[in-house]
Image (cartoon, helix red, strand yellow):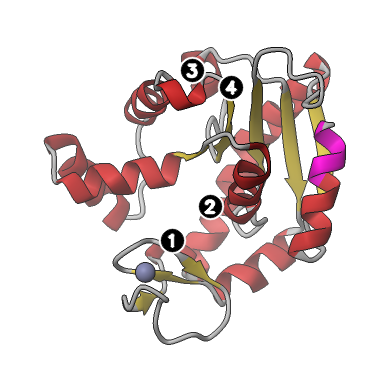
């Protein structure tokens, strides 16, 4: 699909928290030269700008709430309208439910579902730390980011919040996965393996 390069390749990465979507999206972005668009990053950028929307989003994030679909969809839509998306993009973590899929109205060339059992997702997330300054995520026990920023455990990576996120994932994202399966664009990849093995499997699935 990519070799023939019709005009663009639009990739959606789906998977539960802890499935490595962000890491894989960044690797795909580098390999194929198309932007990695993370709804989470767009939200964090908006928070950093301290706009009215950003302050609103920050309060909801701090309370561990999901951001309303209208807000996220609008941010993603604006990002997708930029020139660097003309040859395609990798959407990471959005849409995450049927409502958002319908609101966004983007037809993907391939939807990759990173499959991971809840027990593994929880084990991975419980060791996860994020840089306060640049947002980079670490899975080991590093004390400091490569940028010098402090690492902290995200509020949404704490056990109760994690179980809630997985519950929401199963409730909301499974119907989405079923939709792409029926549409014929779904590929599934076992995300329990190492980063490079998962990456190779994704690349095979989209070529
Ligand atoms: Zn950093």
Q: Which residue is mark 1?
A: 156
Residue 175 visible: yes
Spatial CA distance of label 4 from label 3 is: 18 Å
Q: Which residues are magenta?
A: 202-206
Q: Are marks 3 and 2 in contact (CB under 8 Å)?
A: no
Q: Say what secondary structure mark 2 lies in.
A: helix
Spatial CA distance of label 2 from label 4 is: 32 Å
Position in image of residue 95 (x %, y %): 54, 30
Q: Reading the chain from its start, which is encountered first: label 1 or label 2?
A: 1
Nearer to us of marks 1 and 3 is 3
Q: Are marks 1 and 2 in contact (CB under 8 Å)?
A: yes
**Residue for point 17% across, 45% down:** 49
Q: Which residue is mark 2?
A: 165
Q: Which residue is mark 4?
A: 87
Label 4: few (<14), some (14–19) or many (≥20) C-alpha neighbours in 10 Å: some
Q: Viewer-proximal residue, 45 or 104?
A: 45
Q: Say what secondary structure mark 1 lies in.
A: helix
Quadrant housing residue 116: bottom right
Label 1: few (<14), some (14–19) or many (≥20) C-alpha neighbours in 10 Å: some
Image-quarter location of ligand 1: bottom left
Q: Reading the chain from its start, which is encountered first: label 3 or label 2?
A: 3
Against 35, is 78 above or below? above
Q: Which residue is mark 3?
A: 104
Q: Is residue 203 magenta?
A: yes
């Amino acid at each position: 699909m990519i070799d023939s390069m019709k005009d663009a390749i639009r990739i959606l990465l789906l998977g539960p928290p802890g499935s490595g979507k962000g890491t894989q999206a960044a690797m795909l972005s580098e390999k194929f030269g198309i932007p990695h668009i993370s709804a989470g990053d767009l939200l964090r950028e908006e928070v950093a700008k301290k706009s009215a929307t950003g302050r609103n989003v920050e309060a909801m994030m701090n309370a561990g709430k999901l951001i309303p679909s209208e807000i996220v969809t609008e941010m993603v839509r604006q990002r997708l309208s930029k020139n660097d998306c003309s040859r395609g993009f990798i959407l990471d973590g959005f849409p995450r439910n049927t409502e958002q899929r319908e609101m966004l109205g983007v037809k993907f060339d391939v939807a990759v579902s990173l499959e991971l059992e809840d027990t593994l997702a929880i084990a991975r997330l419980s060791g996860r730390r994020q840089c306060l300054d640049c947002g980079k995520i670490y899975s080991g026990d590093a004390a400091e980011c490569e940028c010098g920023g402090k690492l902290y455990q995200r509020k949404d990576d704490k056990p109760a919040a994690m179980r809630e996120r997985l519950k929401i994932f199963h409730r909301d994202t499974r119907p989405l996965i079923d939709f792409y399966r029926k549409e014929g664009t779904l590929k599934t990849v076992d995300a329990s393996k190492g980063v490079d093995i998962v990456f190779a499997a994704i690349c095979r699935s989209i070529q």
